[in-house]
């Protein structure tokens, strides 16, 4: 699919038609620095310049780790969004100098528009993909070339963001709805964040995080170490740190607040 998209983009480049390019800018330094600060908690060191190879090495390194999904998602959030553009630029994530969307005309308008452009080229020249020919500016192609590609690209990018945000909200709603129907059920999870409030645990198979509140005072209290990102019991017992696997029970899943409260199951099977 990517190879086809890349091929069509290169094929259309000498024609200079209004087909919207799919571009992806390099991540900004501040976002990558925040990701590096996050990753170091898992023993991953990454320094500027943040090249594609370094980022891919991080993805490969954590792929088989229990916390791999959390690191991968944080990396994706640190990257810029891919957008449609009337300007030909590199697609950073894929490493392609020419790229557009062509393969899904039944569900994306930019793909359909590319098909329209190709159709006019083929109709006016008899040309087919892979056959080199001198661009022939028929009236229809000239008309297409006068199309406001910038407006088209900006509009499609904006609608794509709206659709993606709606999909994300619906997915989270369904995830919480699922957990709401499984309150008091037990799940395995991975600690993806340690805070002074408690543990942020990602439920395996559900890919949703919830909070395990941990007491600060009394014989069951914990001390929070902001440097090592660990919670250590005051009176002996298990220390909790990033990447640890735990068993939890769903206490509350609230559709309105979008909050998920969890309770830890100790090694002896008791609920803390």
Image: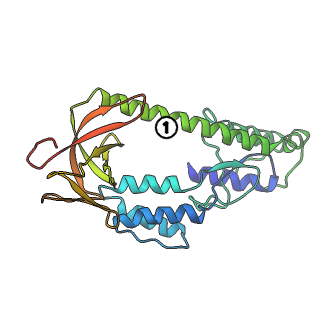
**Front one among 250 and 94:** 250
Looking at the image, which is closer to me, 224 or 254? 224
**Left or right of 104 on screen, residue 186:** left
Q: Is residue 169 left or right of residue 250?
A: right
Q: x and y percent of residue 179 in the render?
A: 31, 32
- One can see residue 12 in this view: yes
Q: Residue at x 75, y 37 (%)?
A: 116
Between 101 and 216, the one lying in front of the other is 216
Asked whether residue 130 is in view, the answer is: no
From the viewer's perspective, tell me whether residue 7 is left or right of residue 257. right
Image-quadrant location for residue 121:
top right
246 left or right of 137 in image? left
Q: Residue lying furthest top in this view?
A: 181
Q: Check disc 1 and report its element: helix, strand or loop.
A: helix
Point 29% across, 32% down: residue: 252
Residue visible at 42% across and 65% down in the picture: 58
Residue 22: x, y in percent? 66, 50
Q: Which residue is mark 1?
A: 168
């Amino acid at each position: 699919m990517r190879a086809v998209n890349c091929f069509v983009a290169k094929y259309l480049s000498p024609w200079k038609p209004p087909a919207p390019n799919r571009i992806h800018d390099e991540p900004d330094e501040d976002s990558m620095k925040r990701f590096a600060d996050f990753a170091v908690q898992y023993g991953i060191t990454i320094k500027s310049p943040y090249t594609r190879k370094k980022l891919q090495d991080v993805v490969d390194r954590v792929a088989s780790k229990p916390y791999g999904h959390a690191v991968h998602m944080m990396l994706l959030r640190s990257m810029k969004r891919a957008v449609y553009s009337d300007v030909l630029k590199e697609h950073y994530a894929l490493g392609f100098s020419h790229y557009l969307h062509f393969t899904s005309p039944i569900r994306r308008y930019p793909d359909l528009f590319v098909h329209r452009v190709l159709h006019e080229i083929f109709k006016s020249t008899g040309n087919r993909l892979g056959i080199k020919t001198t661009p022939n500016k028929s009236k229809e192609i000239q008309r297409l070339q006068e199309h406001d590609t910038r407006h088209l690209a900006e509009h499609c990018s904006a609608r794509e963001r709206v659709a993606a945000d709606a999909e994300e909200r619906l997915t989270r709603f369904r995830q919480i709805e699922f957990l709401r129907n499984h309150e008091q059920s037990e799940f395995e999870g991975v600690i993806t964040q340690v805070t002074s409030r408690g543990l942020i645990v990602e439920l395996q198979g559900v890919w949703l995080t919830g909070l395990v509140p941990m007491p600060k005072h009394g014989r069951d209290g914990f001390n929070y170490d902001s440097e090592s990102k660990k919670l250590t019991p005051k009176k002996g017992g298990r220390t909790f740190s990033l990447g640890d696997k735990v068993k939890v029970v769903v206490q509350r899943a609230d559709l309105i607040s979008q909050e998920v409260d969890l309770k830890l199951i100790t090694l002896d099977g008791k609920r803390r």
